[in-house]
Amino acid sequence: MAYDTNNIFAKILRGEIPNDTVYEDEHVLAFRDIRPQARVHVLLIPKGAYESLEDFSAKASEAEIVAFTRAIATVSKLAGTDVTGYRAIANTGADGHQEVPHFHLHLLGGQRIGRMVSLPE
Ligand code: DGP
C-alpha cells in the first residue's frame, strides 16, 4: 500500500494542523495525543513517510532508527515518566487497530496503565 500523504500526521508534519509539541529534532516529532487515554499520552512519530512500525522497521535508515529510539528516552524525561514508568504501544495494521497510517508510538503514563491487552469477546 502506498503511503497516504493526506493522513493527519502528515498534515501535522507539514504544519497544516497545529499540535502540542513535546519534542522535535531532525528526524522525530513528539506531541500530545488529541484524545488522551492517560494523564500522560504523547505520540512519537518519525518525520519520514512510513505508514506503520512494520514499514519503519523494514525501510527506515539507521540514522532515523537511532534518532527515533533515542527520542523515546528524551520524551519520557520531558513528560516525567522516566522514573514512574509508562507503556509504549505501536498499533500496527488492521489487527493492531491502527487508525492513522503514519507510524506512531503511543507513550502512556502518569498513572497505572492497567492490563496489557484487551481482546474482543
Ligand atoms: P492509532 O489508533 O494507534 O492509529 O492512534 C491514533 C491516535 O492519534 C489516537 O490516539 C488519536 C490521535 N490523533 C488523531 N488525530 C489527531 C490530531 O489531529 N492531533 C493529535 N494530537 N492526535 C490525533
Image: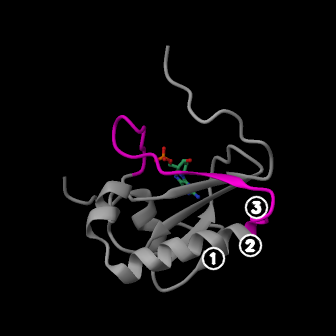
Residue 16 seen from this side: no
Give the tally of numbered discs. 3
| 119 left or right, relative to 53 | right
Residue 30: x and y in percent read: 58, 69
Disc 3 marks a residue whose amino acid type is Thr
**Image disc number at residue 81:** 3
Question: For residue 21: magenta?
Answer: no
The residue beneath circle 1 is 23
Residue 70: x and y in percent read: 55, 76
State how far apart marks 3 and 2 are (Cα).
Answer: 8 Å
Disc 2 marks a residue whose amino acid type is Leu
Q: Residues within 10 Å of mark 3 (few under 14, many from 20)?
A: some
At mark 1, the secondary structure is: strand
Name of the residue lying farthest toward the bottom: 26
Look at the numbered discs 2 and 1 and tell me whether their residues touch, using CB distance below 8 Å: yes
Q: Which residues are magenta?
A: 79-100
Please determine whether, in this image, residue 112 is positioned above or below residue 42: above
Q: Residues within 10 Å of mark 2 (few under 14, many from 20)?
A: few
| 51 left or right, relative to 74 | left
Disc 1 marks a residue whose amino acid type is Tyr
State how far apart marks 1 and 3 are (Cα).
Answer: 14 Å
Question: For residue 87: magenta?
Answer: yes
Residue shown at 47% from the left, 58% from the top: 104
Look at the numbered discs 1 and 3 and tell me whether their residues touch, using CB distance below 8 Å: no
Nearer the N terminus, badge 2 or badge 1? 1
The residue beneath circle 2 is 78
At mark 3, the secondary structure is: loop
Please determine whether, in this image, residue 61 is positioned above or below residue 35: below
Name of the residue lying farthest toward the top: 121
Name of the residue lying farthest toward the left: 1
